[in-house]
Image: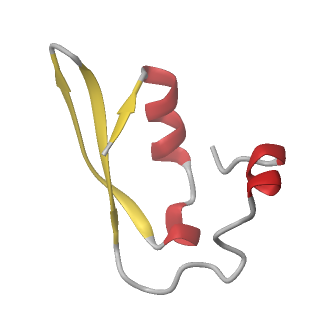
């Protein structure tokens, strides 16, 4: 589950989550904010993941 703004929701929905073997399953809003549920879909996670912290800072996935 990820809290999201309008901009981050667009990023999640347009992202290629196949590298993570995941997909956006659901989106909802409450009085506290907006949320997106991302779930593993099966399959293998890309060999290049997980990445080391310097690589994540230099080139984030999102």
- In the picture as drawn, the residue positioned furthest to the front comes out as 53
Whether residue 34 sits left or right of residue 13 in the image: it is left
Relative to residue 43, is residue 20 depicted above or below?
above
Whether residue 33 sits left or right of residue 47 in the image: it is left
- In the picture as drawn, the residue positioned furthest to the left comes out as 31
Relative to residue 7, is residue 23 depicted above or below?
below
Relative to residue 62, is residue 38 depicted above or below?
below
Where, quadrant-wise, is the C terminus in this rendering?
A: top right
User: x and y percent of residue 35 in the render?
Assistant: 29, 33
* Residue in view at x 45 percent, y 45 percent: 13
| Colour convention | secondary structure
What is the tally of numbered marks visible in this picture? 0
* Residue in view at x 53 percent, y 46 percent: 14
User: x and y percent of residue 54 in the render?
Assistant: 82, 52
Residue sitting nearer the eye, 1 or 7: 1
* Residue in view at x 84 percent, y 46 percent: 58
* Residue in view at x 51 percent, y 24 percent: 7
Which quadrant of the view contains residue 51? bottom right
Whether residue 55 sits left or right of residue 36 in the image: it is right
Which quadrant of the view contains residue 34? top left
Whether residue 14 sits left or right of residue 41 in the image: it is right
User: x and y percent of residue 36 in the render?
Assistant: 31, 41
């Amino acid at each position: 589950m990820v809290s999201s703004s309008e901009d981050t929701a667009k990023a999640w929905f347009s992202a290629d989550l196949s590298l993570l073997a995941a997909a956006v399953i659901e989106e909802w809003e409450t009085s506290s904010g907006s949320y997106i549920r991302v779930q593993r879909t099966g399959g293998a996670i890309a060999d290049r993941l997980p990445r080391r912290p310097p690589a994540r800072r230099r080139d984030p996935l999102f």
